[in-house]
Image (cartoon, rainbow, N blue to C red):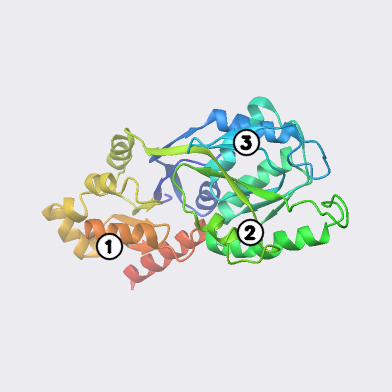
Amino acid sequence: MAPPILLLKTRSSPNDGYDDYFSANNYTPTFVPVLEHRFHTSNLAHVRELFASGAFNLEAKNAKPTQINTNEDAVVPSKRYGGMIFTSQRAVEGFAHMIEEHELPSTPSIPLYTVGPATARTLTTLRDKYLPTSTIHGADTGTGENLAYMMLDHYNDLQETGTSANSSTSLHPAPKPGLLFLVGEQRRDIIPKTLMDPTLPDSKRIDVHEIVVYETGEMDSFETDFKTHVQGYNGEESMWVVVFSPSGCEAMLRVLQLGPFATAATATAAEDGSKRKVFVATIGPTTRDHLRNKFGFEPDVCAEKPNPEGVAEGIRRFMAGLDN
């Protein structure tokens, strides 16, 4: 029987790399959503208007004015954009939802920047269907900071090689088009800070315009849903719980009776891994440190790489250690 693995995340659409990988490697993956994502339909409608207005058509001389109302209640005039940035699968899904509901009024050929293989896979599916001549870059950068430095080189190189297409005249070149960044309500600012760093020379600086297209909150039903899955576990095989963010950690520990919620029985089992049947892995050090610092709980595995292969390798090494 394939060992069960509970993935504390929403299954990505249209495909999920964790589902594909673990299903193909003799596991039984089950998704238990922790976070609820709500799309900002009005802001996504404004994104569509940018495509309709010609904001991504770098040869358009008279783009129709459009105003963007962001979560900060700021009204920003329309600009010309040379590409887009996606650092979360939810942003890609929100963009795809808008296209599927209302279609895309134009299909420009632009660079699409992303971070991490999972988001890149989701973006590739969208690109192949709706923006077939666009290109995807940054899938292997791993962090927003690495992606930002990559864009400083890559995007500026694209603009330099395409100068003739982006210039009004040789004496009066048009301003370098900026990048449109679709983000969630909660996000780090490392990318816009790096690209718009005032210490950079004007020729290197890249304008970034953020539009909030979704917000995230912990699902009220998560603890109950997770408890149902755990209670349905027969205990014959080792079960793994993979945690993807600090959200939901307290409920997870409470259900599993670990950390500050440990009983005498679970505390004894925690000291002797050979007696345990349920193990915990984190997608990376941020979630691991949250469990350590807030709850005094040490997860069994912290993936060295935030992807399905990294999680699976960490699990394999841990289980091999128990057998020795």
| Residue 294 position by quadrant | bottom left
Residue type at tag 2: Gly
Q: Residue furthest front?
A: 171
> Considering the numbered disc 3 on the image, is that residue within a helix, a strand or a loop?
helix
Which residue has dot 3 on it? 96
x 67%, y 41%: residue: 126
Residue type at tag 1: Glu
Relative to 79, residue 64 above or below: above
> How many C-alpha atoms fall within 10 Å of the one at disc 1: few (<14), some, or many (≥20)?
some
> How many C-alpha atoms fall within 10 Å of the one at disc 2: few (<14), some, or many (≥20)?
many
Confirm whether residue 143 shows in the render: no
- Indicate which disc residue 138 carries: 2
Going from N to C along the chain, the mark reached first, 1 or 3, is: 3
Going from N to C along the chain, the mark reached first, 3 or 2, is: 3
Relative to 132, residue 290 above or below: below
Instruction: Answer left or right for 35 relative to 60.
Output: left
Instruction: Answer left or right for 30 relative to 143.
Output: left
Q: CA distance from mark 3 to mark 2?
A: 20 Å
Q: Which of the pair 203/36 is nearer the observer? A: 203
x 49%, y 43%: residue: 184
Q: CA distance from mark 1 to mark 3?
A: 38 Å
Confirm whether residue 107 shows in the render: yes
Which residue has dot 1 on it? 298
Q: Nearer the viewer, mark 1 or mark 3?
A: 3
Rendering coords of residue 155 (x, y %): 71, 59
- Indicate which disc residue 107 carries: none
Q: CA distance from mark 1 to mark 2?
A: 32 Å
Q: Which of the pair 175/194 is nearer the observer? A: 175
> Considering the numbered disc 1 on the image, is that residue within a helix, a strand or a loop?
loop
